[in-house]
Image (spheres, rainbow, N blue to C red):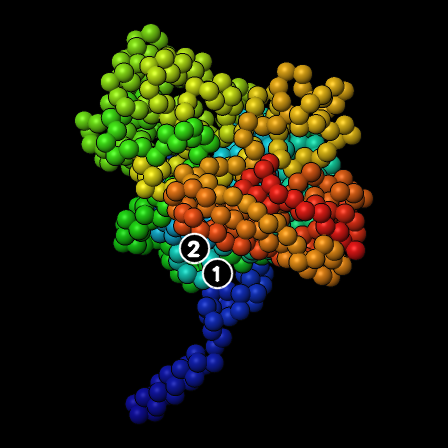
Amino acid sequence: MRKQLSLVCFLAVAQLLFAQKKPITTPVYKDAKAAINTRIADLLQRMTLEEKAGQLNQLNGGVFTGPAVNDAGQMGKVQMVREGKIGSFLNVTGVKETRNIQKVAIEESRLGIPILFAFDVIHGYKTIFPIPLAEACSWDLPQIEINSGIAAKEAAAAGLHWTFAPMCDISNDPRWGRVMEGAGEDTYYGSLVAAARVKGLQGNLDDVSHILSSVKHFAAYGAVEAGREYNNVDVSRTALWNKYLPPYKAAVDAGAATVMNSFNVVDGVPASASHFLVEEVLKKKWGFKGLVVSDWGSFGEIIPHGYAVDEKDAAYKAISAGSMMDMESKVLVKYLPQLVKEGKLTMKQVDDAVSRVLYFKFKLGLFDDPYRFSDEARETATLFSAANRAEALKAARSSIVLLKNQNNILPLKKTSRIALVGYYAKSKEDMFDFWIANGSANDAVSVQEGLQARFGKGSVDYTPGYKADASTDDRLVSDAVASASNADVVIAVVGISGKLAGEERSLANINIAEGQVRLLKALQQTGKPIIVLVNSGRPMVLTQIQDLAGAIVQCWILGTETGNAVTDILTGAYNPSGKTVMSFPYAVGQIPVYYNHFNTNRPAPETGDGAWKSRYRDIPNNPLYPFGYGLSYTTFDYSGLQLSNAQMDKNGKVTVSVSVKNSGSYDGEEVVQLYIRDITASVVRPVKELKGFRKIWLKAGDSETVSFVLSGKDLSFYDGDGNVKLEPGKFKIFVGGDSKNTLEVPFELK
Ligand code: NOJ
């Protein structure tokens, strides 16, 4: 018995010792203390080819198709998660929903690889900020970064890890509905805005307040012909390098985690399959280490472009070009394993793509805590908080651009009796655009509500004036006229529905609708001062209404705080400081019209005889309002533009200074803009190029000397192969309050 007992003891001890010596059962990829690269390598060697293809597969769920887990229609996708065939979802939002799916991935799939949840959080998640185009008109980079930071914070609190923003496409075409998503027509400014947005969205990616950003649409999608969505692009290499690529590069340099392919072709090759764009420019030249995701279906759409014969060929071409994750065309999940087995693609190519997906899952801490972004209490506390709304109000005020203010009819007097006219002044749905993430129009403050809150209900008489489709009739017009007759001032909101801003919202006609013009003409007959507010996600042609209003305020699409921001502007509680970042065309036929064009062989004179010059016979060459333009309730005078030296060598620096005086009677802000022109170069350069700006605040009567330092970098450009050129020669330097009205001095690079 004793012998038996000691044998049992011996065996138990031996077992214990043996157990201690046994290798740790937790796989390395699950070891939070191991380095990310070690974890990725460990995981890759455990994955089947099918599981690797699964990580590159991003599918739509949720928002457009109903709850992902509970809806029977989604059951197929849940089963795919179980089988490791989905690496990422887009459009599944909210803590509850994302958590449900994550649970399946973690607990029921073989390797328990977490899912990345992505969504188009374009200008806010629940607290909706001004559309990006409007926000850019603030010229306030710190505020822009804050706005993106709040969008990220709310999205991250709602279970999301990734947004498809910022859009860095430079565009000269307001017919394109997506100009609302960018930062306008200027490459230099667009680059700064892109970087600010990336920083705001991502932070250092080491907390639960930030999310991955995706720079899009790579590349040159803003050049779609005639502003038609999904249309072709045909740009020269010099335009690509100098005009279109820099903002994407700035975003990548700011640390953007992911880049989205564009739908269009570049140089005859669909961007998703462009080895030149993805491998050569993005990865090799710019050193991008992040993830490249297709646009919706863009891998599959390589076929209709005429560049791949079938889905398998499309999958092959996308991966060969260096693209990685497939949003919704499902060609990788179907064909990638086969392509590797047939030796067409190498395991190295696949592993490179998959490891970049895994990297961000590790980086966000999802392997160690898959539900890090899924905290209901945080979701409730963060979304639509008072602090977030306060920032949205600041952002909205500084986005508004005052285009006209004849006889200083603005700001309004406190005692004004207002005739508020216009369907869009009340209809919250029309004040919201297409990209509103989880925002709700009902949560927004309308122009009517904003004005009533400040002036009292009895002082704001509302009539619609036109219908939802902007048409009108005799009754609507006469009601508005009657209201105007009893008021001190008319505020008329015109433009287009916010719902016509965004993807797949191209318009050939961007004139103010006939019904609205008719309404304004009738209102003008009352002799009352007329203030027009333009509600639109793009610059519209305002030429027909230019003389029908004493004041014109471009309000864009301002989001949650619309009514409060507009009221602050109209009352002068906030002095307008926005300057447009897109030219307002004089007529649709003038498009594309932009300030940084080339001079042409036959430039038309500003005034006088334009015969046989580059001109229109029926309209001016100049836009109605140029890039950089915007009024304040005060005025600014520029004088004494000077250079520290009139010549500089390639490694030198020159200081440009100018005196700016607030010559009016209100304190206010001014965006002081510096432009250059390279007179002669080996690649023709624009007549003006923005190279610096300062937003300054000046008390009425005060002056300030504003200085800029220029170096070789500011005077250089790219040749068609993407080489930086800095060429000696003559330049001009301009400083002013917009791109048209500037002081100028000559300058020479030795
Ligand atoms: C297509 C759009 O072009 C892109 O910008 C967007 O991010 C994706 N759809 C996902 O919704």
Which of the two residues, 206 or 696, is positioned nearer the viewer here?
696
Residue 493 left/right relative to 717: left
Q: Where residue 499 appears, x then y in whole percent?
A: 42, 27
Q: Which residue is found at the position 25% from the left and 34% from the top?
A: 414
Residue 187 left/right relative to 21: right
Q: Which amino acid does label 2 sit on?
A: His
Which of the two residues, 179 or 138, is positioned nearer the viewer here?
138
- Element type at mark 2: loop
Q: How far apart are marks 1 and 2 (CA)?
A: 8 Å
**Label 1 Cα neighbours within 10 Å, binned few <14 / some 14-19 / many ≥20:** few
Callout 1–callout 2 Cβ contact below 8 Å: yes
Figure quadrant of the C terminus: bottom right
Q: In this view, does 626 lie above or below 82?
A: above
Q: Where residue 694 appears, x then y in whole percent?
A: 52, 51
Q: Which residue is found at the position 65% from the left and 37% from the top?
A: 596
Q: Where residue 620 appears, x then y in whole percent?
A: 62, 22
Q: What residue type is labelled 1?
A: Asn
Figure quadrant of the N terminus: bottom left
Q: In this view, does 521 lie above or below 103?
A: above
Which of the two residues, 119 or 134, is positioned nearer the viewer here?
134
Q: Which residue position holds label 1?
A: 204
Number of marks present in the image shown = 2
- Element type at mark 1: loop
Q: Which residue is found at the position 51% from the left and 29% from the top?
A: 539
| Residue furthest bottom in the image | 2
Q: Which residue position holds label 2?
A: 210
Q: Which residue is found at the position 51% from the left and 56% from the top?
A: 360
Q: Quadrant of residue 445?
A: top left
Mark 2 or mark 1, which is nearer the start of the sequence?
1
